[in-house]
Amino acid sequence: MSTGQLVVLDHVVAVLTAALWLAAGAVAAAGRTRVALGLAAGGVLAVAGRLTLVGVLADRGWWFVQEKVLVGVPLLVVTVAAAAVLAGRPLLRGGDLPPAAVTSLFAVGYAALAGFVVTYVGGYPLTWSVALLALAGVGGAVLVTAQAVTGPAVASAEAASGQVAAASRTLSVPARRVGALPAGRGPNPAEQQAAAEQQAAAEQQAAAEQPAAAEQQSAAEQPAAAEQPAAGGPLTRRRFLGVAAAGAGAAGIGLAFVRAPSADAGGGAAAVHPAEHGTPVTDLRGPTTPAAGGGVQTYSVTARRSAVALTSGREVDAWTFDGRLPGPPLTAVQGDLVEVTLRNEDIDDGVTIHWHGYDVACGEDGAPGATQDVVAAGAEFGYRFRADQAGTFWYHTHQVSHIGVRRGLFGTLVVTPRDAAPDDVDLVLPVHTYDGVLAIGDDDGVLEPDAAPGASVRLRLLNTDSEPHRFGLAGTAFRLAAVDGRDVHEPGEVSERALRLPAGGRYDLTFTMPDGPVALTVDGDVRLRLGGDSDPSTGGWPELDPLHYGGPDDVPFTLDTEYDRHFTMVLDRGAAMVDGRPAFAQTVNGRGHPSIPEQLVAEGDLVRFTVVNRSLETHPWHLHGHGVLVLARDGRAATGSPLWVDTFDVRPGEVWDVAFEANNPGVWMNHCHNLPHAEQGMMLRLRYDGVTAVGGGHAGH
Ligand SMILES: [Cu+2]
């Protein structure tokens, strides 16, 4: 079973555990002891199941169980033990349960619920704040339940009486018969009558403040209590628990406001330069001349709002570059100097251009608030870089990108090698969803370009959405020639294999056009046909795993390398501050942007990332300015071709290890490329010592 499936199962069993115990408590309170016994038995099995699951999950990594082992499981074990002591025998014996027994059943339910809430809302890592709040929550719930089960009048009488049953001391609830519940909840009229009488008597006693009488009555009702007179009064005990719970809650709330350290050195040397003194990132600009033999490609791109029709005629209310969807395709030959002037006509939120996967100088990276100021409506900005990397890339705005990119502020960037012959058919295929309609380029139907049999074909697949897409190429064997614009070493020929492309990622597929038809499916639907009609079904094809594809080659580092810095990023959902507001955030190590400590590196460092996904969603991780080498997934080393990527999908429960050399100084965004996730907090910075960002703490995305 995959770790992701185990995480889901654990959630389900946690909720089931809580439901069973709470139901057991409720049913017991209603006097239906036999049903309560059945539910409690189910609850015990559920608890056993949870303990087993936590054990199995622990084997997958401490990240997956930390808060369960430290809070959820201890709470469960303690409350189950208490319930066994208080409710075990009465449940087996049948008949009405004393209030302490009923409360103890509820307590297990609260503990199970608290464990689930800690996991689901608190996430990783566990903080004192969350632990204390969980204890306060369970303690408070137990107190309120004890009060309710006993009945308020009786409770106050008892408080006055100074009487408590020995058993109830464990859970700090007075032991009273369920018959003392308010009238109407008792199982039969006779009992209700008895309850009413008791209540009346208790009220009388409370009003008269006659401890002795109350004690007498209590003792008469409850032989067990009489046999084991309490040392302390319930008032003291309840008050103590109440004060403790309130104190834990207050401390938990207070601790929630403790700020994170501003930087994480990843086990490496601390900063030599103070954060605010160094080279401004705006000084880190691209070269001004092409490489030898290269030319200059000059582009001017204008961002503006525009209604654009897809090929079906469907109109999209878009944010565009140059009034088209996608923006203008930018091309260059390797070694060219590329100069792009960006103008913002009327995008009120502002705009930038980020060169996705292209390792430009940091001042050209287009991260507003980090590498440049946002380009406001009416303003412009010039980008410049040398096209050193040949391959398939794209560009997009990085300002309110969860809206801007979705609405169309992106385009393709393809750099062809200077020395290689071009393919006969070279198709650039950016897949994007506009207003819920999937299109390749601006074509929301089926593309049918020409390809003669025998022609060499390259399909450049780009996923410009925030979710992965699944591709199938039918009618021919093919090679996965490049991933994220970087050539795969010795790509072998495969057929009938599906390709899952992460958000932001690119795959180049190559093949020789056969005599028969070829079709490309996206998420199961044919979107491109070559050489005639065909309507293949690719849904059942197994996925090609790029971690185990192609031929091995030299790599600069492996799992065994001594890294200068090692950063672990645990991705989760949870309550956290995002941009100064509390949110159910997408978190990294329990925090949301901009409160996630920045990662500090020094030029020349070998840096390793371990990225852990504890959540139930896929996170396409994207580091700016550097390709990263995939070392391992779930602890198993990648084989086959060295796999260099700029975006990698970390699916639920997965653990990825990647590495890179810190060879491109700057302040780089490091974030989830599911852009709504980034907006919801899943974004941080990697900063080189001695480089300072623009504008201080806050960066757009
Ligand atoms: Cu994400």
Image (cartoon, helix red, strand yellow):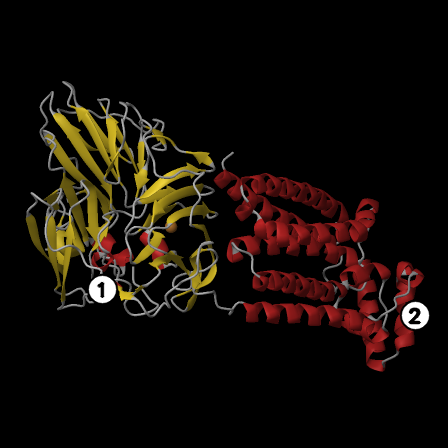
**Residue 382 seen from this side:** yes
Disc 2 under 8 Å from ligand 1? The reply is: no
- Amino acid type, label 2: Gln
Q: Position of residue 333 (x, y in %)?
A: 11, 42
Q: Position of residue 443 (x, y in %)?
A: 15, 41
Residue on which disc 2 sits: 216
Q: Position of residue 289 (x, y in %)?
A: 10, 52
Between the residue at mark 2 and the residue at mark 1, the CA separation in whole angstroms equals: 83 Å
Residue at 45% over, 38% down: 560
Up/down of 527 relative to 332, above or below: above
Numbered disc 1: secondary structure:
helix
Q: Position of residue 436 (x, y in %)?
A: 26, 48
Please tell me in which quadrant of the rendered image residue 300 appears: bottom left
For this rendering, which residue is in front, 580 or 243?
580
Please tell me in which quadrant of the rendered image residue 172 appears: bottom right
For this rendering, which residue is in front, 581 or 666?
666
Residue at 56% over, 68% down: 255
Numbered disc 2: secondary structure:
helix
Say left or right for 281 vs 286. Answer: right
Please tell me in which quadrant of the rendered image residue 10 appears: top right
Residue furthest to the bottom:
208
- Amino acid type, label 1: Thr
Residue at 53% over, 67% down: 256
For this rendering, which residue is in front, 38 or 609?
609
Residue on which disc 1 sits: 282
CB atoms of marks 2 and 1 within 8 Å? no
**Residue 154 seen from this side:** no
Label 1: few (<14), some (14–19) or many (≥20) C-alpha neighbours in 10 Å? some
Q: Quadrant of the C terminus?
A: bottom left
